[in-house]
Amino acid sequence: MNSPAPRLRREFSLFSTFSLAFAYMSPIVAVYGVFALAMVLVGPSFLLALPVALLGQYLVSLALGEVASKYPYEGSLYQWAGRLLGPTYGWMTGWVYMWTVLIAMATVAVGGAGYWGSAFGIDMSSPASRITGALIIVTLCTVANMLGRKPLRIMIVVSIVAEVIGSIGLALVLLIFFHVNPISVIFTSGWGTGGFALALALAGWSFLGFESAGAVAEEVQDPRRNVPKALRYSLLGIGAIVLLSSLALVSAIPDLGAVSSGAVADPIDETFRAHLGPVVTAFANAIFALGFTACCLGLQTGISRVLYAFARDRALPASRWLGTLSTRQGVPVNAILVTIVPVAILFFVSGSNVYNVLVSYTIGGWYLTFLMVLVAAFIVRVKRRWRPSLFSLRSWSTPILVLALAWVAFETVNIAWPREAVSGPDVVLQWAVVIVLAAILVLGGIVLSIVRRRMEFGLHDADIADEDDAGPRSSQSGSTETNSGSTNTESAKQ
């Protein structure tokens, strides 16, 4: 008698899903990934852009939460866009998102290697040391992901606890005991050379990744309720820590003028060493390294599920292999493994102009994929085909969708806009978002032409009507089945 085929298991609670999205976003990465650059280009008034960006992203989390509640399938943006506007549109959205996250994963691993080096006094200035450190981080993340959901949950929660305690604890210490600059400096320092638009572009980096809660939707208990909650809660949690940490750092910088002029290469390390000494600074760097590692772990978890969702729909080459689930744990082992390949390739070009162009693309690519899903949601509303699920904004649904769409459209253009102040005189770097996006779309067009005829979008959905949502969902089942049927029909036509 044949044993049943392995399936995804609903082992993520609301807290586990929140933790995954929180690690994916990481307050450490959100703050320290952009702080030094923002201080040079904008100055302390950069902090005023953070709550504006947070509000804009909260609107996005609400709008995407409605879509996630209606379509709680593995793969997040790929599934959402495909359900709303057809398999081809969903495929291109997922393809752009896939490469955006893989590039981000490589960037975070390289950054984490630098912080681990600082924590243990290891010189990471050479390319060989950075590559080695980054490969170690990705290898550890891969092992953790392949062990199964329970070990993964434990590792993520432990790293988050350390990260949150470290972030909040260090921020409070700086605010209470080392308050050098008045809070009013953020209102009186001006906007530097970049202006408020550049400040918003940089702030946009801090609040990305909450959509990852939807990437594991078929592994979440009661996903129609819990995934939208995890989207919002992770964003708000990250937002609170980012605002507190940024304010603490600005208040404690010993010489704001030197930091704003770029004379201080690492204002965060300089601030900690000036006030707390080398031992505490080494501890802080270990906390930062842990945050970057947890972020890399979350990124790999999320993108491996997107790859699995593609493979299950036979929407990628080697789909049968990529769609394999482990027998004991029911995790997409091959999809996890394959993430190492493009990330490792990116490591070996780190420090080159190619790597710099790819990194410059990342934030713009992220917002573009948000935009693609929100545009699809808006079109469905205009055509009066939308039927809400368990999470619904009711009368506020369309106004919030429009505001979210306007925000993401603005931010996408704002981030992609060529700025010499950010990228220097190199025209290729200035147009990185457009250039890399064009390359990704061309490559995507080639791959799509190969797999289009065999795609089975939506034909292999897991049964999500579990005991938690079977009752409320039944009233929606007609519209859900109709919509799924229409996308499958379109897939067959294409």
Image: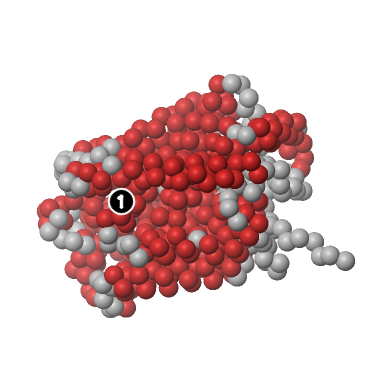
Of residue 394 and residue 130, the one placed in the foreground of this image is 130
Left or right: residue 444 versus residue 491 is left
Secondary structure of residue under mark 1: helix
**What color scheme is it?**
secondary structure
Does residue 333 show up?
yes
Left or right: residue 381 versus residue 438 is right
Coordinates of residue 181 in the picture (x, y in percent)? 18, 54
Give the vertical position of 345 relative to 34 (above or below). below
Left or right: residue 46 versus residue 376 is left
Check the picture and name the quadrant holding the N terminus: bottom right
Of residue 360 and residue 408, the one placed in the foreground of this image is 360
Left or right: residue 13 versus residue 169 is right
Q: Residue at x 16, y 43 (%)?
A: 192
Q: Residue at x 54, y 71 (%)?
A: 143
Q: Residue at x 57, y 24 (%)?
A: 381
Give the residue type that dot 1 points to.
Val
Q: Residue furthest right?
A: 1
Q: Label 1 belongs to which residue? A: 357
Coordinates of residue 197 in the picture (x, y in percent)? 26, 36
Q: Residue at x 31, y 74 (%)?
A: 129
Check the picture and name the quadrant holding the C terminus: top right
Q: Residue furthest top?
A: 383
Mark 1 is surrounded, within 10 Å at the Cα level, by few (under 14), some (14 to 19) or many (20 or more) other residues, namely some
Coordinates of residue 472 in the picture (x, y in percent)? 74, 38
Coordinates of residue 330 in the picture (x, y in percent)? 68, 62
